[in-house]
Amino acid sequence: MQNAKVAVCMRDITKTFGPVVANDRIGLDIRRGEILALLGENGSGKTTLMNMLAGIYYPDAGQIFVDGHEVSIRSPKDAYDLGIGMIHQHFKLVDVFTAAENIILGIKDAGRSLDLKTVGEKIRAICDMYGFDIDPNQKIYDMSVSQKQTVEIVKVLYRGADILILDEPTAVLTPQETEKLFAILRNMRNDGKAIVIITHKLHEVEEISDRVVVLRRGQCVGEKMTKDTNAAEMTNMMVGRQVSLNIDRPEPVDPKPRLIVEGLTVKDADGVVKLSDVSFTAYSGEILGIAGISGCGQKELLEAIAGLQDFESGSIRYIDPDTGKEIELIGKDPREIFDMGVTLAFVPEDRLGMGLVGSMDLTDNMMLRSFRSGRSIFTDRKKPRQLAERVVRELAVDTPGLSTPVRRLSGGNVQKVLVGREISSSPTVLMTAYAVRGLDINSSYTIYDLLNQQKQKGVAVIYVGEDLDVLLELCDRILVLCGGRVSGIVPGRDADKNEVGLMMTRLGGMQCNESTH
């Protein structure tokens, strides 16, 4: 691999956003016939660097060479003309169009010079060459997450790209879908494509990549052939110090029913069933994981428990830890749930929107949970400020000060603020939706430690996650959702990753879609 031809040479690339230096004189080679893993913590500059190669940003300084020739990439079209295509973490597809229509969308004169039959034939040829499996005539809204990703990859190949960049390509895939994607990437590598993947999943880096480049705080701090390194060394390079990669999982102590959900059915505004007859019990002193492909009802489940989601039928009962009294939560809004003495904390998927107010500073965001408890028309900022100081200190939140609007913080620091605020209420039930999505390894392990601390205090923790390896290592039990239904509940310590993956995609022998009509 070391003798592979260099497709892209980036030299002394620098990019700033105001006072923030995102990339500081970075040098990087991308080679044909090789899969390069680009690693780094949040804010290290990985995506910014690749966005400059894809024509989304333009460097402030430095040079880019493609096949030995210096180039200027000022737009995604310039990148495509040079054979560079980027598959983003959040897909850029038109749901009401077919796969074929999305693939040719934006190609000049595509509608006049290309008929869809010819387009379909070319798409099938690409699929046959690399092992893709898509129907060119299928609508995007009828596709699974992995099928949508396939369309994105085929789209850049259709336009002639032989240098491919994939940003967090396995973030929402099952183990089986990940293996299929890796097989395709290997086929493309063997065909001479140059491939870059940006990811946080080090076990996948070890499995699929040939070479690793690590960024830290906007600078390149190391390069290794994958076969010559390991997860621990890569983590140390990313963080700049030694980090333990072990997640503690203490045994639950005296678990008791805290939340009982029975026959819960939820429809969205369009009448689509998002949850169908869901039943389970969450116990004190345990972490209950919720696994499932994106859109299988995880969001609706947590919001229904929190009083934020309408329901069709079912029951959600809270067991008071002091009296043993059952309290019905169905039909109650968050204020009513709080007034009944239910100490329930919710860390939603939408951090800056449902969780925190981006324009408000740390102290004001802490007040959002306590302002109703004041005894006068004037709000007391002293206690919220003390709480903000404690969260910043204990969770190592990187912020210029308490008066900084939270929208200016990195994703990891925003999540620390949100989790810190919620656990400060001393909840008996703590629900988190994708608590570590997009976070670097150091921030992720901080969150895992916080959840385990709550578990050891007797809190019933419900953890919705997308990384099966973490679910299997962190959770005591795992509830698997498929198409809005429960396909099983398995013990975290003994569960098999591939079996859980199959449960996420199949129910009663039938393929599960992202929602049930």
Image: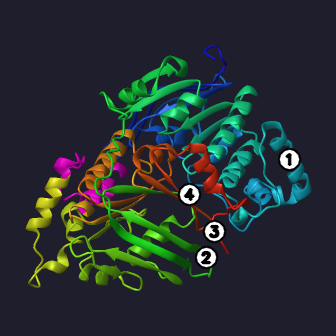
Which comes sooner in the sequence, label 3 or label 1?
1
- CA gap, disc 4 to disc 2? 16 Å
Provide the residue designation for mark 1. 124
In what quadrant of the picture does the N terminus appear? Answer: top right
Q: Which residues are magenta?
A: 392-421
Q: Residue at x 47, y 67 (%)?
A: 280
Q: Residue at x 14, y 65 (%)?
A: 384
Type of the residue with mark 3: Ser
Type of the residue with mark 2: Val
Type of the residue with mark 4: Gly
Provide the residue designation for mark 4. 292
Q: Are marks 3 and 4 in contact (CB under 8 Å)?
A: no
Q: Secondary structure at mark 3?
A: loop
Q: Are marks 2 and 3 in contact (CB under 8 Å)?
A: yes
- CA gap, disc 3 to disc 4? 11 Å
Q: Looking at the image, which is closer to me, 468 or 294? A: 468
242 shown above or below 406: above
